[in-house]
Image: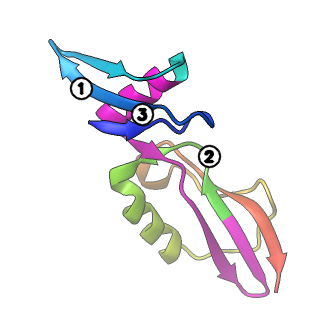
Amino acid sequence: MKTICIMCPVGCSLNVYEKNGEVIVEGNSCPRGEAYGKTEFVNPSRVVTTTKRSGAFSYSLKTDKPVPKTMIFKVMEKIKKTPLKELDVGDVFIKNILKTGANIIVTGKLTI
């Protein structure tokens, strides 16, 4: 698998593959690139960010840790369907969304 490391501004071109049961990362210039490449190969994950409007407020929301990339659309659907009460920045909107271990937290609140 070929990918670009996003852990720093350098953006190393990585070649990641499995050999004898071990994940091998080539092309990284630091240990963060190796860790990123292995994670991307085994279980790619992302922090999900979105906005949601409720009454007089618009909220920015995000997961407090990455969720598996394959679950992003399910996470977004759950956020969309969950009623939103008035919250403040830092509050948890949804705990342990879809049993991923990630919480959806409020990162911003705007009066509209």
Q: Residues within 10 Å of mark 2 (few under 14, many from 20)?
A: some
Q: Which x, y percent locates residue 103?
A: 58, 50
Dot 3 or dot 2: first in sequence order is 3
Q: Residue at x 40, y 23 (%)?
A: 27
Does the magenta segment cover residue 97? Answer: no
How many numbered marks, from 0 up? 3
- Residue 77 left/right relative to 8: left
Q: Amino acid at mark 3?
A: Ser
Q: Residue 51 versus residue 19: which sits nearer the camera? A: 19
Disc 1: which residue: 17
- Residue 59 left/right relative to 12: right
Q: Which residues are magenta?
A: 33-60
Q: Which x, y percent locates residue 69?
A: 38, 50
Seen as rendered, the residue at the extreme right is 111
Q: Residue at x 30, y 32 (%)?
A: 42
Q: Quadrant of the N terminus?
A: top left
Disc 2: which residue: 64
Up/down of 107 relative to 65, above or below: below
Q: Residue 19 versus residue 12: which sits nearer the camera? A: 12
Q: Label 2, secondary structure: give it.
A: loop
Does the magenta segment cover residue 58? Answer: yes
Up/down of 51 relative to 7, above or below: below
In contact (CB < 8 Å): disc 1 and disc 3: no
Disc number for residue 13: 3
When asked about the image quadrant of residue 8, the answer is top right
Q: Residue at x 67, y 81 (%)?
A: 53
Q: CA distance from mark 3 to mark 2?
A: 28 Å
Q: Residues within 10 Å of mark 3 (few under 14, many from 20)?
A: some
Q: Label 1, secondary structure: give it.
A: strand
Which of discs 3 and 2 lies nearer the camera? The answer is 3
Q: Which x, y percent locates residue 86?
A: 76, 73
When asked about the image quadrant of residue 88, the answer is bottom right
